[in-house]
Amino acid sequence: MSKKILYTALLVIFFLPSFGQDMIYHIRKTDSPIKIDGVLDEAVWEQLDVAQNFFQYFPSDSSKADSQTEIRLTYDDHFLYFSAKMYNQSEDRDYVVPSFRRDYRGNQIDGISLLFDTFQDKTNAFQFGVNSYGVQREGLIAGGFGGTSWSWDNKWYAEAKKYPGYWVAEGAIPFKSIRFKEGMDQWNINFYRLDSENGERSTWNQIPRNYDIKSLAFTGVLQWDQPLQKPGSNISIIPYAATEINRDFEDENQSSADSKVNFGGDAKIAIGSGLNLDLTVNPDFSQVEVDQQVTNLDRFELFFPEKRQFFLENADLFSNFGHPYYARTFFSRRIGIVNDTINDEIRPNKILYGARLSGKLDNNWRIGLLNMQTESIEDINLPSFNYSFAALQRKVFARSNIGAVVVNKQSFDSPNDNMDFDPDHYNRVFGLDYNLASANNKWIGKASYQRSWDSDSIDVEEYAHSFWLAYRGRDWRVEWAHTLVGKGFNAEMGFVPRNGLFRIENTLARNFYPKKGPINFHQLEATLETLWGDTETTGEQVKSDQLVAITENIQFQNTSRLDLSLRSRFTYLFNSFDPTNTDGQELPADTEYTYRWFWARYGSDQRKLFSYSIVGQYGEYFNGKRFRLGGDISYRIQPFAAFSLNLNYNRLSMPVPYNSADLVLIGSRIDLTMTRNLFLTSFLQYNNQAENFNINTRLQWRFKPVSDFFIVYTDNYATMDMNQDFGLQKRNRALVIKLTYWLNL
């Protein structure tokens, strides 16, 4: 009987029928020219099928949308064309748009988005969007749960115009800008609209609102009138030229500014219609914005996401192996930087060249290959390293997949005098992953196993394992997760903040949908997370951390949000630790602490020109007290300017002889968008914990699609003098001028 129950449960998990895939759009080819101008005066638009009768997603998901939308699609040998007509509730209204900057984000904006799952795997898709001012955005959806990477760029065309009672978007997407299998006559698609007038969000194919509006489990079908053909040669060359002037004022050996000129570039080559080969020679990533600083009260390394364009297409195939926060197999930000243990700093390590092949072999198989070479650094006797990655993934069941990965980091240089860098060093990791996503999106999960080998192997627990399973129904969400990271597991191309770890996390949440009143949705959530680790002295495994949290999340009808949480944490210190991270007296090793606090956050209606969020925390902290107050305020003069100020203040009151501290982090951003092609962004950050004041200003002129001219200025100051009084001491300064050009062959 127990076996029958088990088999039945497995069938329920893996083979539940898909919900809502009943919408079909029949697309027909056109021979008529279409001008992308937001004016639907071409006769062909009146001859096409119409995707209409959109469903409401927010504030409810049980009725048709109040503000309806009509979408039409057609194509020729080179482009996929779309037109969208968005009706309003009133004849004359204001539209919400943050700026003219490309890749706009947020649920408060008036915009239309199109999702194309070109291989019908319901886990990966291309997303294209246009707002009411004609600003474009494009991104990649990976994993099937709705998350989009907006850092991906590609060449396509769109315009928008406003009319009494409605607005229109019109676009042309080159077939060369997307990947698809030649000979297919169906794609999965969906469209969703954001309407600020009533805070409404709507979709063409209906999606339950307890899932992401971009969830690929709920898509319709795009039925082509004939099988698609390969769009011809698809090669893009993206050369760059850059000059940089920099000065390190803390380096006594650098008495004047250094300057250098760099040339290099990337190439994107389509292999068939489903694979993409990325090549790079002497890459330069200077146009990437600086990472936002944080107040660090953690004992372990912090995680920052990848933003570099070369690593983004099919990024999930590379970055999703292992556990995302405790044992990630591959983390591309490890390539191009090195820990300089001689000078105790993180510094860039020049990438000489790289190649990356990724994409679909067919509807079921995906492949990812990468090889990159960095140069040696003579002043610290750092050898050059070669980074290699190979992954193969197979789709199974409705939306799940299983994959295998091998990564290798290896040096080839002759011996040197730096004991921190072995000239014959290598590090290798093999991993297996199973990613579960049921057809109806109710069951999701992941199981992974990894094994490492390296030249400094200690031959003790050189493995990591994780498992996660979640049920996400309309009313209930239940999750179980456990993670094990062995003492000797070493993934130098990955992200492993701590070793000798065993972790269990359980979550239970109940969703509520009030039919009346100002609250649209609220959720009560309980979480229990426990970690065990090995002590340094005896090697005995003990409970090192435990978090108990009760959280209430409230979504209001006007799109504002309130989150409240009561939390209790237990911490056992394996090593001595200063809880303020200010180099003060450390709490002794082999001591334990239990502390409780209250946390709250409120975010206002983002549709308003003035919006804000505020976060507060008060309670115990190790053997002291912690008070936190933070948040941000934003104001926009749409569509030309947006101003924001972020503040995070922590008051840590610790008993003598330990340090008390007032930690202040202030960041401001000024975003000026004079046109859809000319942008000026200035980002200022002050962090008294790091004793650093940073300025980053970037002027960008997009003189052609995906072709840019940048001027980037960066300045860093130490904010304390030798007497620990506030003052600005110059640290380093850089000016970069860069030109990139996207050329299609």
Image: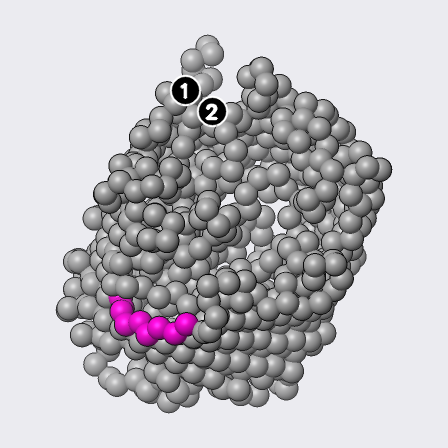
Q: Is residue 550 visible?
A: no
Report which quarter residue 745 is drawn in. bottom left
Q: Marks 1/2: CA distance?
A: 7 Å
Q: What stretch of residues is rendered in magenta?
A: 258-266
**Does the magenta-highlighted stretch encompass residue 264?**
yes
Q: Nearer the viewer, residue 257 or 17?
A: 257
Residue 123 lies in the magenta stretch: no
Q: Secondary structure at mark 1?
A: loop
Residue 637 position (above or below residue 150): below
| Amino acid beneath label 2 | Lys
Viewed as shown, does residue 591 lie left or right of 700? right
**Residue that appears at 47% across and 37% down:** 496
Residue 487 numbered mark, or none: 2
Mark 2 falls on what kind of element?
loop
Mark 2 residue crowding within 10 angstroms, few (<14) / some (14–19) / many (20+): some
Residue 335 vs residue 223, the one in the foreground: 335
Residue underneath mark 1: 460
Q: Does residue 152 lie above or below 9 as drawn? A: below
Whichever of callouts 1 and 2 sits on the residue coming sooner in the sequence is 1
Q: Is 688 situated above or below 679?
A: above
Q: Nearer the viewer, residue 109 or 521?
A: 109
Residue 487 picture location, percent across and down: 47, 24
Q: Are marks 1 and 2 in contact (CB under 8 Å)?
A: yes
Q: Residue at x 84, y 37 (%)?
A: 656
Say the numbered circle drawn on residue 421: none
Kind of residue indicated by mark 1 = Val
Q: Position of residue 310 (x, y in %)?
A: 33, 60
Residue 27's x, y, as percent?
29, 68
Tell me which residue sits at (34%, 82%) in the image: 704
Residue in view at x 15 percent, y 68 percent = 233
Instruction: Tell me if 443 is positioned left or right of 575 in this view.
Output: left
> Which of the pair 320/85 is nearer the observer?
320
